[in-house]
Image (cartoon, rainbow, N blue to C red):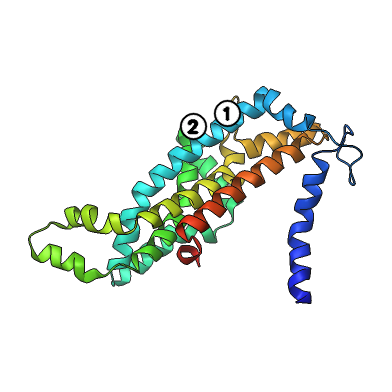
């Protein structure tokens, strides 16, 4: 009990400090705060750079997650059905972004996509974010596929149904909750991504985490604390809804 309490304090104490510094009246981050104000939250919505970066982050994350779903869903299905040695190689390839440090992936993508191929900033961000969230898609949907009775699909095939048709009319409806859970988890990881975005953003195009880092470099007021609180609320809210409505734990455990 004591260990559990210590772990809880260790995990939540920094979050409590950030939350409290976001409501202080001082023009600098101070703990404990003196007084109470919500002006730092108001600053977020009055800042053009913050609002623009929030829009860019939502746009990049949603598109990248949809692309990752289109690629990752059939990949997870193929890996779950295949028993060959080649499937293990493909699985290692798809999970490599989880093994390689994010900063290494970000720098590699920068050298290849931006420096060598000279791709557009948005296109580079789409590709980069898609690559880093595909493993989450495959893992969650792969876990969902383990609960499907293969005999139903085999029966459909024996009755003349093609593999593609059986995939859409039998497999997909049975893993809908897994797909939604994968979308939420991948979206959160894309939205909060720093290493890839740090290397691939450019003039006029910046995701929210990078804008926050740039802001902290020149400012030390509680606006960033307020923004961090909003991000925590959004993230916790999405994960809570996913867990209660879909049982996210059974997909990622």
Q: Is residue 37 left or right of residue 192?
A: right
Dividing the picture into quadrants, the one containing residue 150 is bottom left
At horizontal 31% and vertical 60% (from top left) the residue drawn is: 77
Q: Is residue 183 left or right of residue 196?
A: left
The residue depicted at 52 percent of the width and 59 percent of the height is: 98
Residue at far right of view: 34
Query: From this viewpoint, is residue 236 visible?
Result: yes
Label 2: element kind:
helix
Mark 2 and mark 1 in contact (Cβ < 8 Å)?
yes
Note whether 54 is above or below 70 in the view shown: above
Q: Mark 2 sits on what residue?
A: 122
Place residue 140 in its image quadrant. bottom left
At a point 78% along the width and 69% down the height, the residue shown is 6
Residue at far bottom of view: 1
The residue pinned by badge 1 equals: 205
Element assignment for label 1: loop
Across and down, in percent, residue 106 comes to 56, 46
Q: Earlier in the sequence, mark 1 or mark 2?
A: 2
Can see residue 118? Answer: no
Q: Quadrant of residue 196?
A: top right
Q: Mark 1: give few (<14), some (14-19) or many (20+) Cα within 10 Å.
A: some
Vertical side of 65 occupied by 52: above or below: above
128 vs 23, nearest the viewer: 23
User: Could you tell me residue 158's position as x and y percent?
Assistant: 9, 66
């Amino acid at each position: 009990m004591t260990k559990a309490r210590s772990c809880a304090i260790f995990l939540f104490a920094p979050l409590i400090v950030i939350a409290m510094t976001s409501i202080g009246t001082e023009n600098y981050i101070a703990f404990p705060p003196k007084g109470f104000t919500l002006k730092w939250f108001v600053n977020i919505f009055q800042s053009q750079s913050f609002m623009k970066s929030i829009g860019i982050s939502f746009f990049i994350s949603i598109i990248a997650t949809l692309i990752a779903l289109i690629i990752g869903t059939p990949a997870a299905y193929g890996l779950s059905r295949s028993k060959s040695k080649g499937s293990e190689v493909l699985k290692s390839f798809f999970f490599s972004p989880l093994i390689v440090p994010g900063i290494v992936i970000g720098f590699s993508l920068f050298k290849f996509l931006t420096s060598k191929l000279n791709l557009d900033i948005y296109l580079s961000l789409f590709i980069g974010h898609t690559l880093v969230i595909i493993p989450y898609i495959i893992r969650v949907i792969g876990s969902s596929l383990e609960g499907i009775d293969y005999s139903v699909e085999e029966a459909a095939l024996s009755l003349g149904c093609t593999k593609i048709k059986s995939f859409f009319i039998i497999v997909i409806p049975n893993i809908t909750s897994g797909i939604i859970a994968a979308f939420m988890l991948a979206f959160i990881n894309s939205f909060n991504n720093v290493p890839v975005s740090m290397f691939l953003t450019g003039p006029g195009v910046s995701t929210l985490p990078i804008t926050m880092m740039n802001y902290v470099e020149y400012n030390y007021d509680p606006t960033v604390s307020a923004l961090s609180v909003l991000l925590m609320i959004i993230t916790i809210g999405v994960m809570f809804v996913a867990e209660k409505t879909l049982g996210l734990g059974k997909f990622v455990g």
